[in-house]
């Protein structure tokens, strides 16, 4: 059994120059492909259930799916709630077997974000569940604009919440269809200096070039959320399968054919966060 918490897989990254991929799951086929990719690379993986997946598939089903895959895997697998909206979301995830929850108070004023996050930590830690939070606001490509993380707020946030990992906004953006994010290195250095032992998280990992991911993983950025490039791989594989077999109609046969392409894309993402030999 290799079910792991976020703390289990991120703490070693503070000293070994690597980071762990938080891969956004939308269904059974991609979750299977992601775990197979992690096993092939010999690296841990974080399976993430975001708001889109939760709107399509009930959280108890996602929790059972993640736990089943984790318990059979040969590498550590984290069952992670991504962008939990509050206490109810996080409590349900914990009850459904998730080992890690992200509470997203990034749109709140600092004091309210701290209060919400501290409530989630008080709920999660006694259950052996890790907590990720967000300070600053990571925006969306062609959508809401980011509000960059203020390094002066980081130490207070860490001290008053006891959070296990912190997502920061330093030029990264959700849903970028290709790399192009410009990372604010000075801001990152100030954040790291304010909380030197705190694992940091970058959402919007698809917008960061693989070489830049590898470089950033040499510090305290221990987790990259990656979704868009994997959805692109799924779309390409699905279109190829349907174009190659226009008479095919069996859902399982069609969707299973997308898995090799998704596994290759996931392997590349995971490998981009590993230390050079």
Image (cartoon, rainbow, N blue to C red):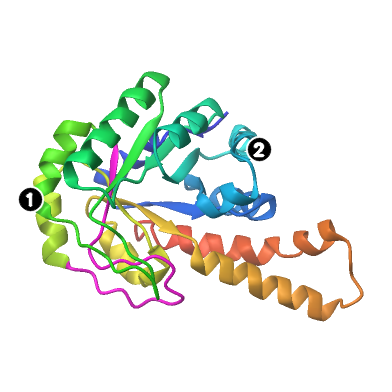
Q: The C terminus lies in which quarter of the figure?
A: bottom left
Q: Above or below — where is 15 with respect to 118? A: below
Vertical placement of residue 5 versus 46, above or below: above
Q: Residues within 10 Å of mark 2 (few under 14, many from 20)?
A: few
Quarter occupied by residue 231: bottom right
The residue nearer to you, when weighing 248 against 86, is 86
What distance separates the C-alpha of mark 2 from that of mark 1?
40 Å
Q: Quadrant of residue 273?
A: bottom left
Q: Indicate which disc residue 152 carries.
A: 1
View extreme (bottom): residue:
243
Residue 240 x, y percent position in the rendering: 74, 77
Q: Which residue is mark 2?
A: 61
* Place of residue 26 in the rendered image (x, y in percent of width and height, measured from the top left): 60, 54
At mark 2, the secondary structure is helix
Q: Which residues are magenta?
A: 164-184
In this picture, residue 92 sits left or right of residue 251: left
The numbered mark, 2 or 1, whose residue comes first in the sequence reads 2
Kindly identify the residue that appears in the image at 13 percent across and 62 percent down: 187
Pick the residue in front: 156 or 21. Answer: 156
Please report the residue visible at 12 percent of the width from the left and 58 percent of the height from the top. 189
Q: Position of residue 12 (x, y in %)?
A: 31, 40
Residue 60's tag is none
Q: Secondary structure at mark 1?
A: helix
Q: Is residue 174 above or below residue 111?
A: below
């Amino acid at each position: 059994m290799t079910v792991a918490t976020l703390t289990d897989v991120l703490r070693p990254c503070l000293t070994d120059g690597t980071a762990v991929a938080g891969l956004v799951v939308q269904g059974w086929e991609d979750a299977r492909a992601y775990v197979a990719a992690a096993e092939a690379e010999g690296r841990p993986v974080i399976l993430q259930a975001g708001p889109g997946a939760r709107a399509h598939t009930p959280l108890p089903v996602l929790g059972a799916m993640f736990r089943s895959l984790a318990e059979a895997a040969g590498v550590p697998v984290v069952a992670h709630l991504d962008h939990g909206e509050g206490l109810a979301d996080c409590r349900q995830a914990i009850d459904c077997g998730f080992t890690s929850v992200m509470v997203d108070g990034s749109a709140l004023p600092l004091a309210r974000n701290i209060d919400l996050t501290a409530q989630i930590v008080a709920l999660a830690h006694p259950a052996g569940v890790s907590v990720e939070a967000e300070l600053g606001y990571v925006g969306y490509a062609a959508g809401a604009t980011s509000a960059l993380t203020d390094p002066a707020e980081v130490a207070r946030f860490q001290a008053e919440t006891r959070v296990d990992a912190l997502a920061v906004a330093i030029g990264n953006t959700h849903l970028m269809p290709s790399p192009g994010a410009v990372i604010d290195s000075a801001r990152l250095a100030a954040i790291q200096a304010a909380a030197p032992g705190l694992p940091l998280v970058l959402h919007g990992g698809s917008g960061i070039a693989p070489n830049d991911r590898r470089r950033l993983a040499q510090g305290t950025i221990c987790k990259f959320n990656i979704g868009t490039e994997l959805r692109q791989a799924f779309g390409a594989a699905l279109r190829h399968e349907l174009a190659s077999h226009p008479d095919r109609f069996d859902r399982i046969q069609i969707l299973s054919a997308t898995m090799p392409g998704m596994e290759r894309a996931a392997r590349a993402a995971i490998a981009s966060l590993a230390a050079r030999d």
